Image (tube, coloured by chain):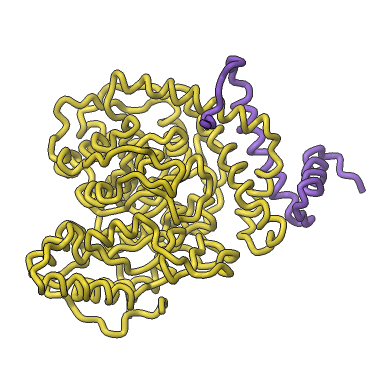
Chain colours: A purple, B yellow
Amino acid sequence: MADPDPLFDFIIASARTLGLPMKTDWLPEVRANLEVTLKHAAVVAEFEMPDDAEPAPIFAA
Amino acid sequence: MPSLRPSSRPKPAPFDTSWSTATEIAAAVTSGKTSAAAVVEDALARIGERNTVLNAFTVIAAERARARAKVIDAAAANKQKLGPLAGVPFAVKNLFDVAGITTVAGSKINRALPPAKRDSPLIEKLEAAGAVLVGALNMGEYAYDFTGENVHDGASRNPHDLTRMTGGSSGGSAGAVAGGMVPLALGSDTNGSIRVPSSLCGTFGLKPTYGRLSRARSFPFVTSLDHLGPFARSTRDLALSYDLMQGTDTDDAACADRAVEPTLPELERGLEGLRIAVAGGYFQQGAFPEALEALDRVAKAAGASNEIEIPEARRARAAAYVITTTEGAALHLDRLRDRADKFDPAVRDRLLAGAMIPSPLVVKAQNFRRWYHSRVLELFKSCDAILAPATPCTAPKIGQQTFNLGGVEMPVRANLGIYTQPISFIGLPVVAVPVTLQPLPIGVQIIAAPWREDIALRVAHALEQMGAVVAPRPSLKVSA
């Protein structure tokens, strides 16, 4: 039965793509963690940065 | 062979070392008041007794320690000059390589690895100064933890209340020092793993500037955030051990090419001339009353009345969270693929989620990191040190899953470090200092500009001299 929750679908597709195991009973906790992380990522992503902003680690040849 | 058996030949030292500082022990060994062998036997006996309840040690390296003590005592007998840590027992979080012992990093998976061939350089430096390694310490699995609980080795227990957490992930390190088993221990801090257990156990802890101490031959977690540092019961011991561990190391790509900058000579300079501010805003939101009381006590003692806002700290914590879970997932990707069922489920589920975060969100977190770094450095033009809580509360109960943070029920495991993460995110040096509240201690962070460990230590020492901060001795009852 298809799960209507897009995050569950995303987790299952990501696990398959990345070759990661994903047992059914792991799904709720993985989903909860993914949701929290995405919320944190959204807090960061909404912050306006100039196009020329450099990421913290810079490669030096 | 390393073992977990108590020392079979306890021999009391001529004087009580059970709550002595490293500095005091080294002075006693150097003066001939006691011997390294006596001190080590005393420590091994105490570890054997107390570890049954504190669960701080996962390996007791008794034979190695005895052999090392013998070398020191032979040097003393030959009138050779002894090092500044002569005869001082110390222990390390079990993610440090110890020759002959497998570096488990709190995991079950790593137990299949061969024993380490060589000690971590920080162990080598401390032993070169006369210190004696007595064992390896319990930690949260792969350092992804703020509780000190470990599903494979059991929870390390808080010496001030055995039903409570030590904090993590360097839980064994804080428990061993606070529980009087060793005067000095090493741990790691990626998001707060030195400062959180220091706070909950009432020890002093130093998280140096990112890149200051070599992380070579230690098991990583998030290489762009990982730091190593000491725990002790006095600021002098922190400064002494830190000074001895400094130095460039090409075996660690992040280790800075800087000359050793000794802090010990600066320790007694007091607070005069220092501008000390208190972090407001984010750093006081959600804190339990005890965290605010501790902060207030330290601020008053330090004469810090000026409150400053660290800009975008909440966002910094969010970015640290994203970088941690994604870099951690990258490190463990193969292990997740092949041996996912051998992880602590709580760690596994966080790492699996981390593996699925789209990369643009990670890059944005790194972009923000650079911006935040430059803004926070601006603050140090108008102040020399910033005070902030180390944890939002005193030690929660072992097994406690949630706590109420600012009116919201939140998971303990992920949120004990809300005040430490925005600081380690940009690698600032911090000394966590213990405030003795009843019934449990709690820590305050003294934060300085990059490479100014001397200032953070100097402030901590001045507060210690005033009696405002002290590592409280637990009334630990251990039945034989």
Horizontal side, residue B134 vs residue A29: left or right: left
Q: Is residue B91 above or below residue B472?
A: below
* Residue beneath the point at 75% across and 52% down: A20
Viewer-proximal residue among B255 and B263: B255
**Residue B176 placed where, x, y %?**
34, 62
**Residue B189 placed where, x, y %?**
43, 47
Q: Is residue B57 above or below residue B416?
A: below
Q: Is residue B290 visible?
A: no
Please count the marks in the image: 0
Residue pushed farthest top?
Answer: A50
* Residue beneath the point at 82% across and 39% down: A5
**Residue B263 in which image quadrant:** top left
Residue pushed farthest front?
Answer: A61
Q: Is residue B254 above or below residue B44?
A: above
**Residue B408 placed where, x, y %?**
56, 37
Viewer-proximal residue among B339 and B67: B67
* Residue beneath the point at 69% across and 38% down: B357
Q: Is residue B300 above or below residue B45?
A: above
Residue pushed farthest bottom?
Answer: B8
Horizontal side, residue A33 vs residue B278: left or right: right
Horizontal side, residue B385 vs residue A11: left or right: left
**Residue B85 in which image quadrant:** bottom left
